[in-house]
Image (spheres, rainbow, N blue to C red):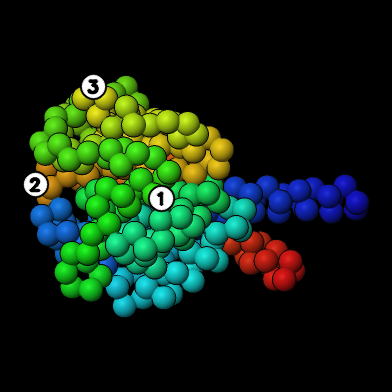
Amino acid sequence: MKKLLSAIIIGFAFASMAIAADIAFYVGAFQPGTYDDKSMADDVEKIIKNTGSLFNDIQKFDDKDLHQFGKWTDANTGDGHLDIIWLNGQIPSTLYPTFNKKPDGSRAEEWLDDGNMFINVADWFAWATHENGEKERNMDAGAANILDLAENIIVGRDGTAMTATAAGKKFMPSLGNKYLSNRPVNLNALVAPWEAAEVFAERKNFVDPVVLRNTKTNGHLAIISQSKTEDMGDRGEVCSEFINNWVKEEMHLLAVEPTDKLAITWGSIKRD
């Protein structure tokens, strides 16, 4: 009986470790020309449909829900789990106070310092927000402050033709061999503790898609298709492939079964 009980406890422990990931999608206002309402909605629904089995909790937040978005972020910071925030190319003030009012210690920075992940598509990561109906800019200081890197870690290079790497072909087959990026990551500005964990498409020192990793905190920033609407390709499919292939493999995510979800809920109640 003791052996059976031990096996059950170990099973619960491994289930909790493997299936604890949560994901939230920011679906607020975006930069015109990098998205449109239907494309964004379709992309988010496709990602949820294709990857939802990997996540215990899935949320969507728009500009009416920023307070709740902040609370969700706080609840998932410091919980010991890998969690993901997907951004539509804008960073709401609840994550990073607009106009660089909090260059250090923002929720966005703490999110990465806790070993979590951002997936950013469409526009320059942390450059701006449109949550108040107009473009309010952090400019290149936003990404620099959150990552503690130089301001040229992302650069403006409209129409940069990217060629898929072997990793791109393996993990993101729908990316194709070539596509255009407008806001690639500049590997020349990447310094420790940050590294390029994987490069999926490149042109010399400019890369997109790419996933950056902080080797000290295990925080990850995935840049996927920072490009104009007409150049974007199928972002929903590419993001789905990134999660289902690269994140699942590297972060050891397993599909969440209904019984596993009950086990996690029971464990949380017991710990409280």
- Does residue 228 appear anywhere in the picture? yes
247 vs 42: above or below? above
176 vs 244: above or below? above
Q: Crowding at label 1, few (<14), some or many (≥20) Cα neighbours within 10 Å?
A: many
Q: In this view, does 179 lie to the left or right of 47?
A: left
Residue 184's x, y, as percent?
23, 37
Q: Quadrant of the C terminus?
A: bottom right
Q: In this view, does 256 lie to the left or right of 240?
A: right
Q: Is residue 250 left or right of residue 244?
A: right
Look at mark 2 in the image and give the residue it sits on: 230
Q: Crowding at label 3, few (<14), some or many (≥20) Cα neighbours within 10 Å?
A: few
Q: Crowding at label 2, few (<14), some or many (≥20) Cα neighbours within 10 Å?
A: few
Residue shown at 45%/69% (left/top)?
70
> Counting residues from the N terminus, which is met first, the one under dot 3 or under dot 1?
1
Residue shown at 14%/30% (left/top)?
161
The amino acid type of the residue labelled 1 equals Ile
Residue 1's x, y, as percent?
90, 53
Look at mark 3 in the image and give the residue it sits on: 204
Camera-side residue of 165 and 236: 165
Residue shown at 60%/58% (left/top)?
78
User: Between marks 2 and 1, how big is the CA–CA gap?
Assistant: 29 Å
> Counting residues from the N terminus, which is met first, the one under dot 2 or under dot 1?
1
Residue shown at 45%/34% (left/top)?
194
In this rendering, the label closer to the viewer, 3 or 2: 3
Q: In which quarter of the image is residue 165?
A: top left
